[in-house]
Image: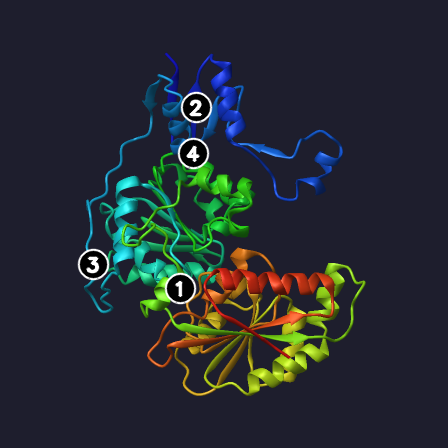
Amino acid sequence: MDKLKIQNNYSWFLSTDEKIKEVLWKALRFRARGYFHNVRYKMKIWDGFNDFFKKDSGRFLSGLLPEVRMALNHLAHPHEVIDEREPFEFGIKSVDENFLNFGVEPIVLRDYQVDYINMAIKNKRGIIPSPTSSGKTAIMKGIIRALPPKTPTLVLANKKSLVEQNYDEIMKLGLGKVGRLYGEKKEPNYITCATVQSAHLLKPILPKIRVLIVDEIHEMMSRKPKQVYLALKNASVRIGMSATAFKFGGTDKSQKYEVKGWIGPEFLAKSTEDGKLTTKELQERDILSSASCKFFRVKQPILQYEIYLDAVTKGIAENEHFHDIVTKLVLGLTGRTLIIVERIEHGDRLQQHIPNALWVRGQDNVETRKIIIERLKKEQGELIAIATSGIFNTGINVFVHNLVNAAGGQADHQIIQRFGRGLRRAEDKAHLQYFDFIFENNPYLEKHSWKRVSVLEKEGHQIIVED
């Protein structure tokens, strides 16, 4: 009889039936995004497809087990299951809204947070797709508290600031045995919050890790994180967290199946009608801030024939006309304001126009970023901060009244994540003013501008465009 052999990283469908392997191979192969630019494709040594089921060996990533099992059941193909994974059970079988309602910062869990924690306990592998600013940190804390004591656990992120944020929150559980691993911090423990760049330092103990939690999983599919996942041979619990786990609105099937393959399928929240939790629903429930979205037209300088990179440089980063518009806008705003830029030189120029603005970049250390992030959470009166998009696109908690996207961009996940930075509610903030720009001075920039409008409208936001 054919066999389905299961391990934590890879599984195998062992069969001599070439027809059924052909079916699985065809169903689980997808074009890579931008494949036609690849040198191997141009040289005709690669067809542009990534195969998630190997026809010769029957190997596939274990997160795709639901797809393979569904296909085998649909085809009524008999097979024997050989599960070689070491059994793992959570210490808590299910949680309710009061599971984290204790300590110095008690949390009453919302219905969807309870759903996602219980889904993680039951299924052990999967993606939590809760929208930006909806409280994914509380979900992560709930999962960790439900583990048996002293379970070797790795909480992985791609930025030091995210590691610090996760570490601080997990410490509030009072479990002890929590460590950090990045740069100057080398203190692994039973629960280790680490950057993916430093995770290789755990190489001797990675095979002993039983639980993996990946923050902002959509950013963690490059070669380095996959090397870490591969070393986690005994991590049968794998949870990915992101409002936008699948990039470009899920149209990049290759990226989508990599995420699902290494982690697992998306969880559905029982407390919602169709299982999907939306930003609009959370705004209607007063969990997230209401928002107004205004786009201003930028018409100068005319860059009709500039290629994209030059258009970004001349039309955004070095565009004094644009800097004047941004300056006039933010100086007329009240409350805490965050300006997102893409390039260092852009932020430098804006700070010359707004000398009182705080300016935080990738080169700033963790303590400097922490100070600015805290001020963006609590400062009373007027505060303007400029930050590169890499710092504030994902994960960082701030409570701003005004968010100015001066970075452009067109990728769905970046736009949604960026917008979500401002939707957190605070005692002095229940509404977000979001400002963006229609760059009519270049065809590439204009196309991307209208893409941002389209993405936000799809998310349920009303857009106003003004001169």
Q: Amino acid at mark 4?
A: Leu
Q: Are marks 1 and 2 in contact (CB under 8 Å)?
A: no
- Helix, strand or loop at disc 2? strand
Question: Closer to the N terminus: mark 2 or mark 4?
Answer: 2
Q: Which residue is mark 4?
A: 64
Residue marked by disc 3: 97
Residue drawn at 62 percent across, 83 percent down: 327
Q: Quadrant of residue 121?
A: top left
Hey, what amino acid is under mark 3? Glu
Whether residue 465 is visible, yes or no, is: yes
Circle number at residue 12: 2
Q: Are marks 2 and 4 in contact (CB under 8 Å)?
A: no
Q: CA distance from mark 1 to mark 2?
A: 41 Å
Residue 405 in which image quadrant: bottom right
Q: Position of residue 139 (x, y in %)?
A: 31, 56
The residue carrying mark 1 is 280
Q: Position of residue 160 (x, y in %)?
A: 47, 60
| The image quarter in which residue 380 lies | bottom left
